[in-house]
Image (cartoon, rainbow, N blue to C red):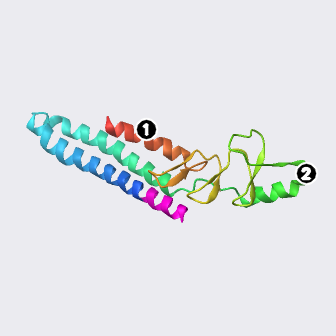
Amino acid sequence: MANNSLFCASLATQSVALAVFLYEGFAYNMVYLRRILPAVGKAPLIPPFAVLFNTAWGLAIWSYMKAHWVDPGTVPKGWQDWVRSMGEALPVAPARPEWQPGKATYCKKCEIPRPERAKHCKVCETCVLRMDHHCPWINNCVGFNNHKFFLLLGIYSGLACV
């Protein structure tokens, strides 16, 4: 029940983030470029401003969608099988809240061995490789496969705001 409420809260936050993105694009293009710049006699600046903003805004939307849709990276089945085949040669330590450098750990919830820096997400209910955090704004974990898109989202969003 708690995971369902976390997912719903994350989905609501994602909806707000998308609404803000769409409002930003509408306000800049319809209000600033079409009304304010011509009213103050700066009409020649409309084309370059439109290209710069819409490029950064479009790349921010693209990065947002990729960060949301790309699987953050789960522990591969092949890795789990390899760890089990190693037996005592590769000890699997019990998981602790702090970082355990160089150690494979065992997830009690997923009941699988996982590599260093993999962490279990309460919302997604899976172990994520190189997990950074579960981001409610993209409604996904930030992990090994989508970390790049999450960083690009911040960069392009900042450029669009400038």
Return the disc, 2 or 1, that comes first in the chain's sequence.
2
Tell me if mark 1 has few (under 14), some (14-19) or many (20+) residues whose alpha carbon lies within 10 angstroms of its own.
some
Question: Horizontally, is 113 left or right of 15 in the view?
Answer: right
Disc 2 residue type (three-letter): Glu
Residue visible at 59% across and 56% down?
122
Expressed as whole percent of the image width and height from the top left, the position of residue 36 reads 13, 39
Distance Cα–Cα, label 2 vs label 1: 45 Å
- SS class of the residue under badge 1? helix
Task: Name the residue furthest front.
Answer: 1
State which region is magenta.
Answer: 1-11
Residue visible at 33% across and 40% down?
160
Which quarter of the rendering shows the N terminus?
bottom right
The numbered disc on residue 56 is: none
Q: Which residue is mark 1?
A: 155
Q: Are marks 2 and 1 in contact (CB under 8 Å)?
A: no
For the residue pair 109 and 47, the one nearer the viewer reads as 109
Residue 7 on the magenta span: yes
Q: Which residue is mark 2?
A: 88
Disc 1 residue type (three-letter): Ile
- SS class of the residue under badge 2? helix
Expressed as whole percent of the image width and height from the top left, the position of residue 22 reads 30, 52
Residue visible at 32% across and 50% down?
20
Q: Main secondary structure of the magenta part?
A: helix
For the residue pair 154 and 134, the one nearer the viewer reads as 134
Expressed as whole percent of the image width and height from the top left, the position of residue 103 reads 78, 43
Residue 22 on the magenta span: no
Expressed as whole percent of the image width and height from the top left, the position of residue 71 reads 57, 57
